[in-house]
Image (cartoon, rainbow, N blue to C red):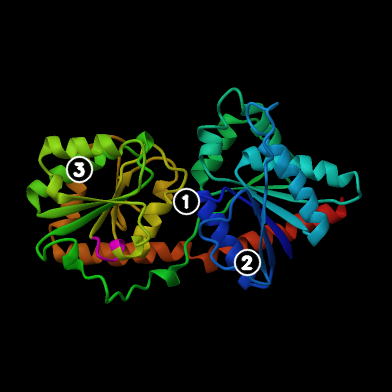
Amino acid sequence: MKIGMVCYPTFGGSGVVATELGLELSKRGHEIHFITYNQPVRLELISNNVHYHEVNVPEYPLFHYQPYELALSSKLVDMVKLHGIEILHVHYAIPHAYAAYMAKQMLKEEGINLPIVTTLHGTDITLVGSHPFYKPAVTFSINKSDAVTAVSKSLKNDTLRLFDVKKDIHVVPNFIDLDKYNHSFTDCQRHMMAEDNEKIITHISNLRPVKRVQDVISVFYNIQKEIPSKLMFIGEGPEKEHVEQRCIELGIVDKVIFFGRSNEIDKILCFSDLFLLPSLTESFGLAALEAMASKVPVVSSNTGGIPEVNIHGYSGFLSDVGDVEDMTKNALYILSDEKRLKTFKENARKQALKFDLHEIVPQYEVIYQDTLAKCLVL
């Protein structure tokens, strides 16, 4: 198949998943065309089966905000006609599904039927999409897609609750390439991050308020009072300064390391003993899955799609949002016994195996094939 892949080209989970999906599909013989305003961050290799087409948005003084949706729609029309793209897979309802529908209508005028598969990732539904200004456009975009997927059962239920959706929604979870998590590092030793008697606790996020990073600090503060530990913070965001100030107030500055946007996440996870994810909401919890793939048990909140990834009492523990005391208790339970810690590490990896890309990507292929077949009948 010739597949157009539309996504945000940033470090966000939806862009990463879309890029990894496209790359794996290319390995399976499909021709993939990424269409967005920058080359996706994970798209390192352009090949005969992988192409990137940049969407340019000309600046005109007339527009207070430049019309990306119009530029994207026009680019989609051009690329479909030029490369014979058979199906579009768009990630995020707005603006991508909205722009794809406009392209579909323009192409229909020329006798070209372009099927659209839309994947819902989270904030396009729970945050942006549910805003009264955007809700009609999101509802329209979902219902006009030829097939719709969501990355968790929780997100599917949120979508059906928040919007008047007429389409069936297929749950296809996020995934990771587990082959990339078979670590064998020799150039980065654990002692560079912590002493032999210290445990390594890790948190990875964009440090937004929804991630409740103050709870990360609170849980870690309680842990280190009982067990010698270091905390690894990976990511940048608006809460970073507040977190740094809190560390100063609690007197734990020497026990917390801020890596910023690190390209060595796999190495840090490789030497981690526990991952904290106390988020207010998560549509899936991709960061938790990446940790589990590296044999790192997870102590998290029980919100959104996280319970579909992190299994309570097996790969880690779940607590109510904001329940720092329970998260602390669960963390100490895992870390206080080496045999128990080893069991949780092994279980975390076993749970992650269920989300290997080789298990998930074929589900998308089936959806593409079914969608194409239905559109041919029409």
**x, y (%) of residue 62?**
70, 26
Image vertical order of residue 203 relative to residue 281, above or below: below
Residue to which mark 2 is pinned: 25
Q: Compute the Cα span from label 2 to label 1.
A: 20 Å
234 or 335: nearer the viewer: 234
**Residue 100 appearing in the image:** no
Residue 269 belongs to the span the image colors magenta: yes
**Magenta range:** 268-272
**x, y (%) of residue 56?**
68, 46
Residue to which mark 3 is pinned: 219
The amino acid on which the numbered mark 1 sits, given as a three-letter code, is: Phe
Q: Closer to the N terminus: mark 2 or mark 1?
A: 1
Helix, strand or loop at mark 1? loop
Image vertical order of residue 352 relative to residue 172, above or below: below
- Give the residue displayed 70% in from the left and 44% down from the top: 72
**x, y (%) of residue 354?**
46, 63
The amino acid on which the numbered mark 2 sits, given as a three-letter code, is: Leu
Q: Residue 11 — which label?
A: 1
Q: Closer to the N terminus: mark 3 or mark 1?
A: 1
Is residue 288 left or right of 56 when viewed as pictured?
left
